[in-house]
Amino acid sequence: EVVLTQSPGTLSLSPGEKATLSCRASQGFSSRYIAWYQQKPGQAPRLLIYETSSRATGVPDRFSGSGSGTDFTLTISRLEPEDFVLYYCQQYGSSPGTFGQGTKVEVK
Amino acid sequence: QLQLQEAGPGLVKPSETLSLICTVSGASITSGSHYWGWIRQHPGRGLEWIGTVYYTGKNYYNPSLESRVTISLDTSKNQFSLELSSVTAADTAVYYCARTHGGYCDSSNCLTAFDPWGQGTLVTVSS
């Protein structure tokens, strides 16, 4: 199965700064089927990005996704206070679908 | 507005069967436009896809769990359920149900994102 490695494990930034989260796959897969989720404490994950770069309904445009092959990125252009939480990537281009271990964005 | 809600015992003994139900409101699980899945999150973050079901009863399971998992439907109640047999402490997790989003499902594989998710229910395996 495809192993997703997210880096860094923790990202320390200040409100208003730009966040760049990485998701690297152990092998390529023949599609753009990468999703990103946001998880707040005590809540279920919420879909932010699907098919690498498409924003889910209601997601602010400060969130964007990019990448291809084995390297994918979630970018938050200007961090708002509510963005300091956990983020996960998921690949659904190779069976079984798998998730990364998460990146925590914390206030510096 | 679509909502999903998990329900079931919070404590299961080792070697027994974990059983959870997901009740869907705001959409019919028989509409045919989406599939329905279970995902779990182990303590310390890790998310794992368990399986997905279509309203026809067609199932797709994670190979790592396939020998122990059954997902079924109760269309009269707009519910789908999860059974995981022969549980051990490694099955302790928060269990989520969710609707599929995008991707594709064919005769062999079902590869999708998930949105929305239920709030999740913690199941602890302990004697």
Image (spheres, rainbow, N blue to C red):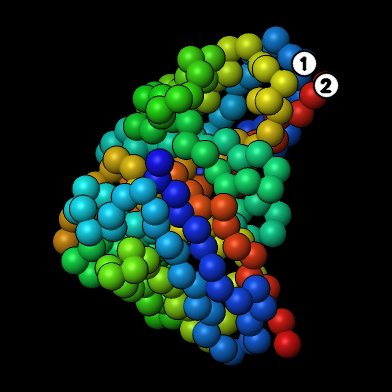
Q: Residue B2 placed where, x, y %?
A: 40, 45
Residue A7 is situated, as x and y percent measured from the top left of the image, at 63, 34
> Which of pointers 2 and 1 lies earlier in the amino acid sequence?
1
Which image quarter: residue A17? top right
Residue kind at label 2, given as amino acid type: Lys
Identify which residue, B112 or B18, lies in the foreground: B18
**Closer-to-camera residue (B49/B100):** B100
Q: Chain of mark 1?
A: A
Q: Position of residue A22 (x, y in %)?
A: 56, 29
Residue B121, image quadrant: bottom right
User: For the residues marked 2 and 1, what is the alpha-carbon distance in whole angstroms?
Assistant: 5 Å
Q: Nearer the viewer, residue B6 or B25?
A: B25
Classify mark 1: helix, strand or loop: loop
Q: What residue did someone put label 1 on?
A: A14
Q: How many marks?
A: 2
Residue occupying the far right of the picture: A108
Q: Say which amino acid is labelled 1.
A: Ser
Q: Which mark is residue A108?
A: 2
Which corner quadrant holds the C terminus of chain B? bottom right
Q: Residue at left 16%, top 61%?
A: B107
Residues marked 2 and 1 touching at CB (< 8 Å): yes
Does dot 2 land on a helix, a strand or a loop?
Answer: loop
Q: Nearer the viewer, residue B70 or B31?
A: B31
Q: Is residue B63 visible?
A: no
